[in-house]
Image (cartoon, helix red, strand yellow):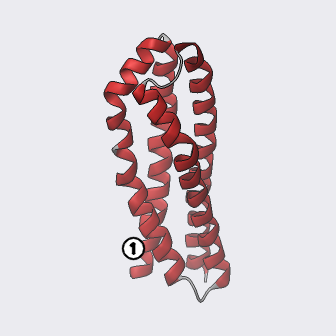
């Protein structure tokens, strides 16, 4: 039963994380691109907390589920390795987040970027964000494969 809880939490949370990031990238990203750079910076500085507050609510359960899934499947190498890949993908997303997105978001929020550079930086932000979405989706897919493989045993 504990295995099912961890597997479900890991899959649902990583898939949910993908969904949150898709919403940010497609919906908000499209809106942000429609704004003149100065208006984008003003909007971002005023509203960034709504974006940043949503992420921990889904990432923390993802890490709990993934770590639990690895632990409960440790004795079954083929399943454990799929969960380890899923974990690695989410760790890469976390590294990208802290190394690129946190500084970029801070620069946007504080207006520490020249207005003339905003559009190029925002376009880069969105393209790299799409990579994060893909990695999180792959993490969920590897989790689904691991769960299916476990069910087949």
Q: Residue 117's spot in the image, x, y percent?
A: 59, 18
Q: Residue 44's spot in the image, x, y percent?
A: 39, 25
> Within 10 Å of the Cα at label 1, are there few (<14), some (14-19), or many (20+) other Cα atoms?
few
Residue 2 visible? The answer is: yes
Using residue 35 as the reference point, say whether residue 141 is left or right of it. Answer: right
Q: Who's the residue at 47% across and 21% down the image?
A: 32
Residue 8 visible? The answer is: no
Q: Who's the residue at 57% across and 60% down the image?
A: 91
Q: Who's the residue at 57% across and 78% down the image?
A: 150
Using residue 143 as the reference point, say whether residue 57 is left or right of it. Answer: left
Q: In this view of the protein, which residue sits in the foreground, 139 or 53?
A: 53
Report which quarter residue 70 is drawn in.
bottom right
Report which quarter residue 118 is drawn in.
top right
Q: Residue 11's spot in the image, x, y percent?
A: 49, 62
Quarter of the N terminus within the rendering? bottom left
What residue is pinned by disc 1? 5
Q: Vertical placement of 39 versus 72: above or below? A: above
Q: Residue 88's spot in the image, x, y percent?
A: 62, 64
Q: In this view of the protein, which residue sits in the foreground, 58 or 123?
A: 123
Q: How many marks?
A: 1
């Amino acid at each position: 039963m504990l295995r099912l809880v961890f597997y479900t939490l890991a899959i649902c949370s990583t898939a949910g994380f993908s969904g949150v990031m898709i919403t940010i990238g497609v919906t908000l990203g499209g809106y942000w691109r429609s704004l003149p750079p100065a208006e984008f910076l003003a909007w971002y500085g005023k509203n960034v907390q709504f974006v940043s507050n949503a992420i921990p609510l889904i990432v923390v359960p993802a890490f709990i589920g993934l770590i639990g899934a690895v632990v409960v499947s440790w004795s079954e190498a083929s399943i454990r390795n799929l969960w380890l890949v899923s974990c690695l993908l989410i760790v890469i997303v976390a590294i990208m987040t802290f190394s690129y997105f946190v500084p970029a978001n801070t620069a946007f929020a504080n207006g520490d970027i020249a207005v003339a550079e905003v559009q190029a930086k925002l376009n880069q932000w969105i393209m790299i964000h799409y990579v994060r979405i893909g990695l999180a989706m792959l993490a969920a897919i590897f989790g689904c494969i691991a769960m299916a493989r476990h069910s087949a045993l």
